[in-house]
Amino acid sequence: MRGVRGRCALLLPVVLLLVGAAAGPPAPVVATDRGPVRGRTHGAYDTFEGIPFAAPPTGPRRWRLPEPARRWEGLRDAGAPGPRCVQLPVLGSGGPVGSEDCLYLNVTAPSGRPTGTRLRLRPVMVWFHGGGFFSGSGDVYRPDRQAVRGDVVVVTVNYRLGVFGLFGHPELGGAPGFALADQRAALRWVRANAERFGGDPGNVTVYGESAGALSVCAHLASPASAGLFHRAIVQSGSCSTTTPPSALLPGLGTYEPFVPARRTAEEGARAAARLGCDRPSGVLDCLRALDARTLATADLMRRFSLVPYGDGALPMEPRRALEAGRFHRVPVVQGTTRDEIRLFLAQTLAAYPIGDENAYRARMERSFGVETARAVAAAYPVSAYPTPAIAWATLLTDASFICPTLRDGAALARHVPTYGYRFSDRDAPDFTGLPQVPGLPLGAAHGFELPYLFTITPLSGAQQRLADRMTGYWTAFARTGVPGAPGAPRWPLLGASARVLSLAPGAGGIRTVDGRAEHHCALWDARWPGVTTAG
């Protein structure tokens, strides 16, 4: 009896634990158009992860437009993200990770479903991740703060990357842009299923950062994306974003994220030949027979990380579409961080240093030409900055990100309500894992606003208050098209004066500034307007 009592004593905590678990809130279940899914509850919000929004683009579906996901029988568990798309590690060495079977999305929604009329449904925000179109995934971004504080439904999306997402070839009829097609498939899934999660399919905001922002830009200019969204937020990746040659490494050409489809198809033909698939016909069958690891090389993943234009889905280079007024008439928020280029420069500075003023001037001349370099040196004297590296990062940020974004903003503002911002917290936490570079603090670098919108890394008290305010602006814009809230500093419409909202913590940290004046945009518009390859 003593042994039995001992075993009962050992089992009692386990029984109580099971009883407690059984007594907890039930896992939420939603019936999607492909079958029911069981998510996870987290108190104030629920998550549904790893939901397929398209059929796996594997085998014969490699380099085909996304097809509907198959229906499933029974209850599908949605308690963990699906596989990430094939990619190489961002930091360090190693082979490809992820899977070609990767077209999954994640839904985060406030607990409890709205009832009654459509007017009670919540705004939906669909996030496209960054990563240069060759890395990243939707599950990295936890939007619980937005869902709870903003009372919105947030959807994060995977899409095909690199050679799997932006490959082109004459046998494909050019370069169909599979990555953007995947995103459209996710938006169609949202239109069909948002209401089942308490979201309003008639009030969808697309937003993204870096490559995700370039994606939003492309959807603004794409006839194929008509009617799939109603507002847009572009974070650090405007339609006109471009970087001059040799800016980060010698021999590195101009970075232009949008390229003619014929160029992509020609690159595809050359790549197929190098891979031994240069037969007179059946090239795609040969390429589809190759293992994913054979295709996921550093060269091919980066070579096919540029968005093709010139077909029915994206007929014009997006910045030209904005200039011509040929874009969807939806309200837009656009912005940058104050020190965008420092993130990229930090990764190349050791190999390509800027040791003194002579090196600084030489790099200016190499990137902009001798005549423009003189004007740039007058506006950005190296003596005005702590180090030559900071001077170079400052002028590159203005030339490549801030002023192009303001140019796009002016084009947008002629037709739709447009708002501009600059994220300015130079003490933002560094979550990159990059080693510190002497003479180049990262400051408010590319992507450093993300922890203020998503749960990524801890923030100080003042930074958390800024995060709450930014979350309020973003979700108010999703709800009404106006990024404003009671008690918040007013966010002005972007106009001829280029007044943008500077976002920083502390008293007076949120204020209006003249972006064009502070970042020498008249100089850049006159001397280096970022004209890219003609269509």
Image (spheres, rainbow, N blue to C red):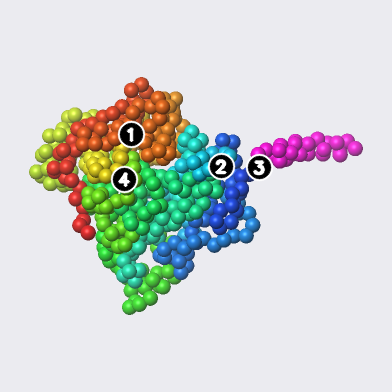
Residue wearing tag 2: 116
- Residue 332 in sight from this viewpoint: yes
Q: Which mark is residue 237?
A: 4
Q: Earlier in the sequence, mark 3 or mark 1?
A: 3
Above or below residue 239? Residue 393 is above
**Residue 353 percent coordinates (x, y):** 24, 41
Query: Which residue type does callout 3 highlight?
Result: Pro
Q: CA distance from mark 3 to mark 2?
A: 23 Å
Q: Which residues are magenta?
A: 1-26
User: Is residue 427 or residue 102 the one in the foreground?
Assistant: 102
Tell me the element at label 1: strand
Residue at the (33%, 60%) spot, across then down: 313
Q: Which tag is nearer the camera, tag 3 or tag 1?
A: 3
User: Is residue 1 or residue 191 the one in the foreground?
Assistant: 191
> Pointer 2: residues within 10 angstroms few (<14), some, or many (20+)?
few
Q: Earlier in the sequence, mark 4 or mark 3?
A: 3
> Pointer 4: residues within 10 angstroms few (<14), some, or many (20+)?
many
Query: Which residue type does callout 1 highlight?
Result: Phe
Q: Quadrant of the C terminus?
A: bottom left
Tell me the element at label 3: loop
Residue wearing tag 1: 423
Q: Is residue 132 left or right of residue 519?
A: right
